[in-house]
Amino acid sequence: MPTPSLLLITNAEAGTADVEAVDTALAVLGAIADVEVAATSSPDELDTVLARAGGQRIVVAGGDGSLHAVVAALHRRGELGEAEIALLPLGTGNDFARGLGIPLEPAAAARVILEGATRRLDVVIDDTDTVTVNSVHLGAGADAGAKGAVWKERLGSVGVGKLNLGRLGYPIGTLQTALKPPTLRVRVEVDGELLVDLDQQVLMIAIGNGTSVGGGTALTPDALPHDGALDVLIATPVGTWARLAYLLRLPFASHEKHEDVKIVRGCEVRVAGTPFDCNSDGEISGPVRRRTWRVVPDAYTMVLPAESGATASGN
């Protein structure tokens, strides 16, 4: 059996804890594979590294944002379909890894990188050719994400044992949003079917390829990134107390039970109306007045735990 060849991409500005986790993983990986480590700190540096990847398995050392950056760069380069990606979860939330059952402990994740199976996964692409790996949310979700990112940065360097307090960022951001929630007036269409029109207030829209955001908040709990469909959550609570009740349910994943919440499935989502921001895998853009998202099935190959139902790996 040939020796596996890995390109491990790290964040050049990673903290001490991440460096230690990478070292732990390298001790496992290096015993079996040829590992090239590349630290990047900008999109240009990432492009340079990916340009020399060749047939190497690309290992992303980071969280959802790092995975998003690599997948987006490969998409821009026209190389996503041929890429084989593995994940060493080092982020604060690691939502995509959680949803796929990838271990969060470095040595265990390294063993999956070496011994795991491969599976084709979907991505979400909007009408500006922006890629989303895990989740897009609008309205209160984007507002909570923006506020939560500030707290995530403030608390990310604080830890109690192995607990990174940066995970509290999203619940804190949600609470702040709950105190003054935004509302949208938009048309929402899923696969051409009009679900909400401009005469109805919308608190939040989520388009899920993965299950959770913010370190485990199960926003679209039944979403699967390999089923060729998107799970679309639309929350339309009216009145201050109804909106507050919904938003306070989010950190506890009980929002589905709210009477003003619907979750539908489809392949294309169109939103148009009053200006709104978009949160794509933690990246905030906007405001815009219209946007369309579609699922691209089987867009790339990812290495997953064998028990996830993936196909046998060639390594």
Image (cartoon, rainbow, N blue to C red):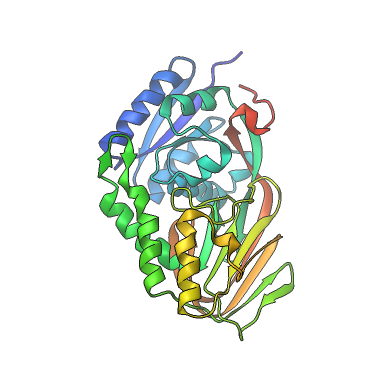
Residue 220: quadrant of the picture = bottom right
- Judge left or right: residue 192 versus residue 59: right
Q: Residue at x 46, y 31 (%)?
A: 7
Q: Residue at x 38, y 45 (%)?
A: 92
- Res 303 visible: yes
- Res 276 visible: no
Q: Is residue 287 above or below residue 24?
A: below
- Judge left or right: residue 158 versus residue 268: left
Residue 303: quadrant of the picture = top right
Where does residue 291 sit, x and y in percent of width and height?
Answer: 58, 71
- Judge left or right: residue 176 versus residue 293: left
Where does residue 115 sit, x and y in percent of width and height?
Answer: 57, 22
> Depth check: 195 or 45 in front?
195
Q: Residue at x 71, y 60 (%)?
A: 267
Where does residue 294 sit, x and y in percent of width and height?
Answer: 66, 61
> Depth check: 266 or 172 in front?
172
> In the orientation shown, which residue stands out farthest toward the bottom?
199
Where does residue 79 sit, x and y in percent of width and height?
Answer: 59, 44
In which quadrant of the rendered image does the C terminus lie? top right
In which quadrant of the rendered image does the N terminus lie? top right
Q: Is residue 157 above or below residue 148?
A: above
Q: Residue at x 45, y 78 (%)?
A: 240
Q: How many marks?
A: 0
